[in-house]
Amino acid sequence: MKRTAAALMALGLVAALAYLSGCGLNPFASAEAKPDDPSKAPAAVPVEVAPIARGRIETTLKSSTWIEVEEEVKVYSRAANRVAEVRVEEGDAVAKDQLLLRLEDDLQKTNLGKAQTRVEKARQEHARQEALFGQKLISEQAFNDIQFELRQAELALEDAQRELGYTEVRAPIAGTLTRRLVKYGDFVNPNQHLFDLMDFDSMVARVHIPEKDLPALALNQVVRVTSASLGDREFTGYVRRIAPVVEARTGLVKVTVGFKDIRELRPGMYVNVEIVTATRDDALLLSKRALVYDRDLRYVYRLLPERKVERLLIEAKLEDRFNLEPASGFQEGDQIVIAGQTGLKDGALVRLPTDPEPESPKDAQPRGANPAP
């Protein structure tokens, strides 16, 4: 019985080997793929590259702030009376000393007339007393008294003229009327707020820059200003003033930006400010699209002739919004990976969009091989 069972097992093994051979399979082949098996070769990573070229680059300091004016005046009444005439409206451009508003002035004119009469009478009396004093007919004390009375009358006349002048409200500066707070017929009192005036030519933007950037700042540096409310329009300013001190609490330096042409800029607008601190017209430009970040360090991948890449640390001399200028280690024409670099490793095999498509494992199967059952 034992011999019969062994014989049956041997016959079954022989039948299984014969079946595998008929299917084109080698039952004694290793389960591991051959070293040159194309299905197990490392796949090339598809990437895009761009050459390093030369061009213009700027380095800037960025901040945001509100537009304001340095010359702004609130106009107040200096007399009490009813408004007889309003000469200006909000938005009007006015010149210095231009008439803005006139109050009723009947009382002031009457007081002025009385003061003028008193002065005239005092002058006549002074002339008469002077003649008598010359003839030694009156004492020196009497002549001094009449001189004093004349001076008092002249001062009263000046007061009356001033009070009449207060009934005409004039612009203390040239500018634009931004607010009117009274209308015809209103009764105003002394020190009542009437108008707001702004000189738009004195418009500035004040930004605060970290003290570490202070050495890069200089007067008259070009400043680019943009506002979200005005779309992509760009306005040119300049560094007008740099504060001589650093704010101890914040470590910031106040920089005042001036404008030579304000165009559509208006006080109160929120703007983005870029101070151009350095410029190079013939710099090596490496696109920031190529950067890979590893903690605080930045790297790029450069394409090698054998379609491999090398990982290089980047140190920038200058950089702007889109490009940077490498400090060293690169030259014009170097091909830098700008897409597909995520997950790349140093020495990785890559494929460009212009390279032929790699063969699939099915296409790489030797011709004449028997298909799997």
Image (cartoon, helix red, strand yellow):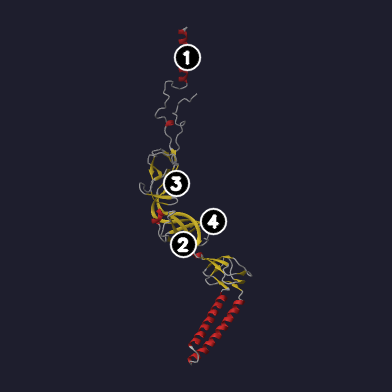
Please state the horizontal and vertical placement of residue 120, each as a whole percent of the image.
55, 85
* Cα–Cα gap, marks 2 and 3: 34 Å
Q: Dot 1, how many residues are within 10 Å of its Cα: few (below 14), some (14-19), or many (20+)?
A: few
Please state the horizontal and vertical placement of residue 63, each as a whole percent of the image.
47, 54
* Cα–Cα gap, marks 4 and 2: 20 Å
Residue picked out by circle 1: 12
Disc with the residue nearer the chain's start (2 vs 3): 2
Residue picked out by circle 3: 289
- Front residue of this view, candidates 225 and 288: 225
Please state the horizontal and vertical placement of residue 291, each as a whole percent of the image.
43, 45
Q: Dot 2, how many residues are within 10 Å of its Cα: few (below 14), some (14-19), or many (20+)?
A: many
Please give left or right for residue 70 compared with residue 308 in the image.
right
Tag 4 near tag 3, CB within 8 Å: no
Disc with the residue nearer the chain's start (4 vs 1): 1
Amino acid of disc 2: Gly
Residue picked out by circle 4: 229
